[in-house]
Amino acid sequence: MVETSKQDRMPYLLFLCENRILAQNIDGHVIDLGGLTKQNGTIDWLLDSNKEKGENLKTEIEALEDIANKIDFLFLDGQFTSLPDISAEYKDKLTSAPSMEIGFVE
């Protein structure tokens, strides 16, 4: 009998690059989710579409973790549907940008 309760996780990458929050899907498409500012040793971030935000984070990894905890599959899927693919603009910059892989059950 085939197991039907197993759910696959959909992988995404989050990046912080040039004061922008970027996401990349499994197809290599990159979208711009929002912005971040670094000031007085802390990082604040704000998503453009839903105004979700994080404040007073100490490191870029902490900021990425905070973002990952405040978004879900439906949000990201909707953003990839509605926002333009900007992968050509960032293709040479993402390899050195702080990043984090996240995964959601569809």
Image (cartoon, grey):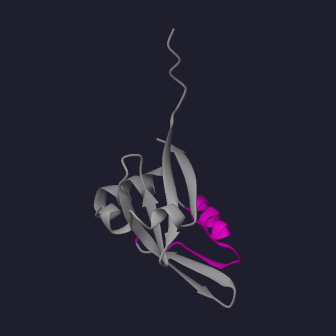
Residue 83 drawn at (x, y percent): 31, 64
Residue 53 lies in what quarter of the image? Answer: bottom right
Residue closest to the far bottom: 40
Residue 32 lies in what quarter of the image? Answer: bottom left
Would residue 50 be visible to someone looking at this image?
no
Would residue 45 be visible to someone looking at this image?
yes
Residue pictured at 56% horizontal, 52% vertical: 101
Question: Horizontal placement of 76 versus 41: left or right?
Answer: left
Q: Is residue 14 above or below residue 102?
A: below
Residue 86 lies in what quarter of the image? Answer: bottom left
Q: Is residue 96 above or below residue 44?
A: above
Pick the residue in front: 59 or 80.
59
Question: Horizontal placement of 105 versus 90: left or right?
Answer: right
Residue 103 drawn at (x, y percent): 54, 47
Pick the residue in front: 89 or 10.
89
Magenta-colored stretch includes residue 68: yes
Residue 6 drawn at (x, y percent): 55, 27
Residue pictured at 28% horizontal, 64% vertical: 84
Residue pictured at 36% horizontal, 47% vertical: 27
Total marks in image? 0
Pick the residue in front: 72 or 21.
21
Q: Is residue 19 above or below residue 10?
A: below
Magenta-colored stretch includes residue 27: no
Q: Write down the region rendered in magenta.
A: 49-70
Residue 16 drawn at (x, y percent): 52, 70
